[in-house]
Image: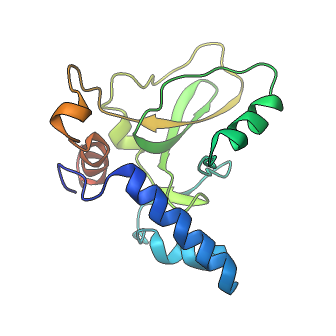
Amino acid sequence: FNRYSLIEDDIYDQLRYRLNHWVRCIAIPEKRVNNALSPTISLQNRLSHPVAHTGLKKLHGKGALSEWLAERKNLWVQPKVDGVAVTLTYVQGNLTQAISRGDGAVGQNWTDKVKYIPAIPHFISQAPPLLVLHGELFLKVTHHKQKEAGGINARALVAGAMMKKSP
């Protein structure tokens, strides 16, 4: 993983949008394209997600945003966090699994590694018998202004740390 992004997020998004457009034009199954673009997951140390971990669908343009907002009554908006997707599973309040997004159905087992992250509780009191949380692992960077200093690609730093063989 690089300390600096090789391509800006908005450029990547534009290229991915264009690719998806061309894929629809020539009728290639989207799953086939996504499999070709996703990193290969090692056959070892894999876990199935208890609930599919899909990404968020991006909206293009103010009209699409207005239409999407009109369908929602109670909305909670928060700043975008550029992190690494993770599924946390708690059974009887105990953290039992941490899984990378992978392909959305199967991901890397990160359970032993997330136990070293103080922000992730090992136990949640008063949790339901089974609790599945989808979230982001991210590196908090203070006093960094991307517009002035450029990207440091904190997401790649987090992903690199999670891919190490030992925590």
Percent position of residue 71, x then y? 83, 32
Q: Position of residue 164 (x, y in %)?
A: 24, 53
Residue 75 placement: quadrant: top right
Q: Is residue 93 above or below residue 2?
A: above
The residue depicted at 24 percent of the width and 43 percent of the height is 167
Asked if residue 7 is positioned above or below residue 58 in the image, the reply reads below
How many callouts does the rendering have?
A: 0
Would residue 166 appear left or right of 83 to someone viewing this image? left
Q: Residue at x 45, y 22 (%)?
A: 121
**What's the residue at 53%, 68% (across, down)?**
18
Compare residues 63 and 118 and report the one nearer the observer: 63
Residue 163 appears anywhere in the view: yes
From the viewer's perspective, is 141 left or right of 101?
A: left
Q: Residue at x 49, y 48 (%)?
A: 99
Please identify the quadrant where the N terminus is shown.
bottom left
Evaluate whether residue 28 shows in this view. no
Percent from the top left, x then y, of residue 5?
25, 53
Q: Position of residue 27 (x, y in %)?
A: 70, 84
Return the residue found at the far top: 126
- Between 57 and 104, the residue placed more toward the observer is 57
State the residue in front, 1 or 78: 78
Residue 41 falls in which quadrant of the image?
bottom left
Q: How is the image coloured?
A: rainbow
For residue 46, side relative to residue 141 (left or right): right
